[in-house]
Image (cartoon, helix red, strand yellow):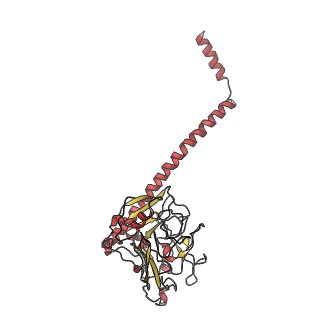
Amino acid sequence: MLFGGLWKLWGENMNRRGFTLIELLVVIAIIALLVALLLPAVQQAREAARRSQCKNNLKQIVLALHNYHDAHSCFPAGYFSYGTNNGSGPAWANIDANTWDAAPGWGWGASILPYLEQTAIADQMDSRLPIWHSQHNGLVTAKLSVFLCPSASGGDDAFTVQDSTANPLLIAGNQIRLGRSHYVASHGQESCWGECGATPANVVFSDIYTFTTKSVAVNGDVSKVADGPFYRNSHTKFRDATDGLSNTIFLGEHSPKLSEKTWVGVVPGAFTHPRFSSPENSPDAAATLTLVHIGPSGGELDITGFPIIHPVNFPTYHVGQMYSEHPGGGHIALGDGSVRFVSENVDLITFAELASLSEGEVVGEY
């Protein structure tokens, strides 16, 4: 009897056609629940992989800087520019009347190409000619994966260099396009973008703890202001990092979601423009195509008149600061070749201490 009843019930079930509406809704609800549970885990796994790739990129870049130092006994300049102490020079130098930026303009990223397995590009470049010379067409627009963070949005392809009004900058009637970088070099605490040329003096902070200032006569020599490893015509050596290489920021991230950066270098007369608006955000001079700073800087105050220190993702959103799209912070590369992920909530003074090369500040935990 028992087996007969089961056989009959099984037969009736076999004669059914499809699911009932309730059964279908239950299945859909279960699938939706599983997707809701799994999707964040999948996204986190993908971001972890992107973050790992970004860290590896920075590791390769900072090691290339070390190899450059081994070959040349110094690190590359933040960017190379015709030297002038009065704003004058030959016509080929194309000296910017305000910033005194000039040809050839090659930046730190272009200088280390041979140490990033990019000799095919590097061998075709002539460092004596400006980056916008016709000989370099097709070279300076190259998309190089080592300079691209997988988490960054806003574009990987070359971009058109802009002037102060956000129109294409023209040199000899030609527009200039440069390959993009999501990584930038540190100028230190102080910035010297548009103020290290025709401006006769620059105010800098002599003490980041008391915010006392002093006035410095620049006369085109950015080393009188910059306190980090990279700036115009810098030639920093290992021995210059008296605060310790492991306590000095060399590189960081900057997503094109905020502004456009390049591995190529600096074009006189160019401006970097923010790609979204915020109260403290505005265009800045050409040096910010390759460099950022951390603050405090004598020329940079917030709306209350207080000095600004901006670690990764700080909501000033300056074109001259580090900016990452990794959740919670971003990567920095230190002078000893190590790469660390730093929280966007890091102590401001601690991050400022890490920015300087030889200020004698004692860095705590971060």
Please state, as top left, top right, bottom left or bottom right, where the N terminus lies in the image: top right
Instruction: Give coordinates of residue 31: x percent, y percent.
Output: 59, 38
The residue that appears at 43% across and 55% down in the rendered structure is: 52
Q: Could you say which is closer to the camera, residue 117 or residue 330?
A: 330
Q: Residue 227: in sight, yes or no?
A: yes
All told, the count of numbered labels is: 0
Using the image, determine if residue 86 lies above or below residue 304: below
Question: Which residue is nearer to you in this view: 6 or 52?
Answer: 52
Q: Residue at x 60, y 40 (%)?
A: 32
Q: In which quarter of the image is residue 238?
A: bottom left
Location of residue 292 with respect to 89 vertically, above or below: above
Quarter location, residue 21: top right
Tell me residue 341's x, y (percent). 43, 58
Q: Which of 101 and 133 is in front in this view?
A: 101
Question: What residue occupies the far top of the structure in this picture?
Answer: 1
Quick one: quadrant of the C terminus? bottom left
- Look at the image and tell me whether residue 117 can be seen: no
Give how far across and how far down residue 200 sits, in percent.
47, 86
